[in-house]
Image (cartoon, coloured by chain):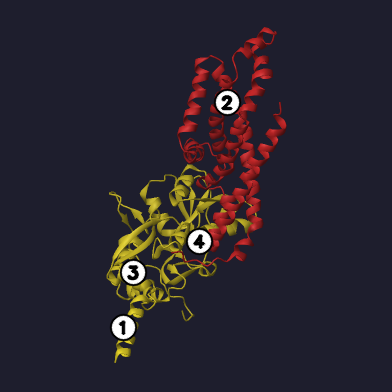
Chain colours: A red, B yellow
Amino acid sequence: MFNYNFRWNQALSSLPQMLEGALVTIEIAVLSMAIGITVAILLTLFRLSGSRPLSAIATTWVEIARNTPALFQIYMVHFGLGGFGIHLSPYLSLLIGIAFNNAGYLTENFRGALKAIPETQTRAARSLGMSPIQAFQNVILPQMLRISFLPMTNQMVWAILMTSLGAVVAMNTDLYGVTSELNARTFRTFELFAIAAVIFYVITKAITLSARLLAARLFRY
Amino acid sequence: MKTSVFAAGLLAATALALPAQADKLDDIIASGTLRCAVVLDFPPMGSRDASNNPVGFDVDYCNDLAAALGVTAEIVETTFPERIPSLMSGRVDIAVASTSDTLERAKTVGFTIPYYSFENAVVANEKIEMSTWEDMKGKVVGATAGTYEAIWLEGKVKEWGEGEFRPYQTQADVFLALSQGQLDATVATVEVSQANVKSGNYPGIKIVDKTPMVPDYVALITLREEYGLINYMNLFINQQVRTGRYNELYKKWVGDGEPASLIVEGVYR
């Protein structure tokens, strides 16, 4: 039983506001991926470094990021740090929370990618006179990023979807935040969230498709 | 003779197959259960006691209504934004959830006459210098997402053109943020504000002022077309006041003093 009369015109008139929210969502996802990839490369280096404390940092990060809910991570950035007097805006809390999660997952992706690269390549590079850093930077890193390119797009899709968790830290400018605020005012729940779902779908689909096209161009042997 | 028996049989069969259209009120009485959506992190209206049972003004109100209908009450926990989906999907029959009766919302759901009226207070972090509600201008303020006071406060922040508005998901998060100093001030019902200041769960907060908004009349809601049920609930609310039960519940959950008047002066209804 479903007792509801759909009135699309009322909800559709809020479309411009929702599209603005979608831009904020994309912005956060892109930034969080940029931060996430940078940190993940760093954590991968920590793991490769052979230093115990450094690889312990990397392992702890990956364990927490992958084995606790993203919701919890974002909440802790806002209210956990808030308890220590570190006050981050909803935007920053959400961005840092998602970036933290991204970094954890991507580090694991990179580990998998590294396993696919024969170790002999490092030795070959070294025997050509490259320093360990040069060998990583010029030989290993490009291949690692290439192998993990598609998993990275997965994470990007996740990042888009995770922005909706911003609600727990009072984020109200992203797509979900805008939608739920409109909902509180008008009670047109089903139309509004259906529209939001379509926008989310279009964004994520566009990301996966363009990533595939990009991969086909970039990685032609 | 034969034809009339046949006709009678046919009539009986149609009557069985197509009973008179039963409305929600019939359904509730027939099923023996009244399912109420209640928000349970909104004390003193709704919360959970030490043994995790739902308690509060709204919970009692639902129980009273069920008793009047001669059925058992079933409390279904909900959040403010989830009230409408629960109603529309048929998970609950009505919502006793402090729902403000705005005209915008009345396009979608059916409201009864008001069953309670809130006044709202400005609560601030102790470190913030504030004496009137207008001092919220330019500050970081927040309220519980989806509530009347949140809609009001956000409108004010937009009107002032400075400061920041943050809608937290639950009342508890709002007061946590306020206590931590992430928020400078919030607007919450006087009942909730006093309860939270008194409980000591959120140190470092103080009540500053009352807000100048129109009293926040809240009503019971159900599907818009359920006139039979809305009618019944209107009478029920009237009887609650008439019999003194309204005052009794107020004393039990809110405290001493008089509950807000549900009469709007100078208008028929």
Q: Which residue is mark 1?
A: B9
- The chain that hosts pointer 1 is B
Chain letter of the residue carrying label 3:
B
Residue tagged 4: B148
User: Which element is circle 3 on?
Assistant: helix
From the top left corner, tell me how far across and down residue B220 is, in percent. 41, 68
Q: Mark 4 is on which residue type?
A: Tyr
Crowding at mark 1 (Cα within 10 Å: few <14, some 14-19, many 20+): few
**Does B232 appear above or below B32?**
below
Identify the subunit bearing mark 2. A
Q: Amino acid at mark 1?
A: Gly
Label 1, label 3: how many angstroms apart (C-alpha)?
Answer: 30 Å
Q: Marks 4/1: CA distance? A: 57 Å
Relative side of B244 to A206, left or right: left
Q: Which residue is mark 2?
A: A110
A146 or B134, nearer to the observer? A146
Mark 3–mark 2 Cα distance, whole angstroms, equals: 58 Å
Tag 2: amino acid: Phe
| Residue labelled with disc 3 | B28
Confirm or deny contact between disc 4 and disc 1 (CB under 8 A). no
**Which is more N-terminal, label 3 or label 1?**
1
Q: Give the residue type at disc 3.
A: Ile
Tell me, yes or no, whether dots 4 and 2 are on the same chain. Answer: no
User: Are dots 3 and 4 on a single chain?
Assistant: yes
Alpha carbons under labels 4 and 2: distance apart = 48 Å
Do the residues at pointers 4 and 1 share their chain?
Answer: yes
Q: Position of residue B233 (x, y in %)?
A: 37, 73
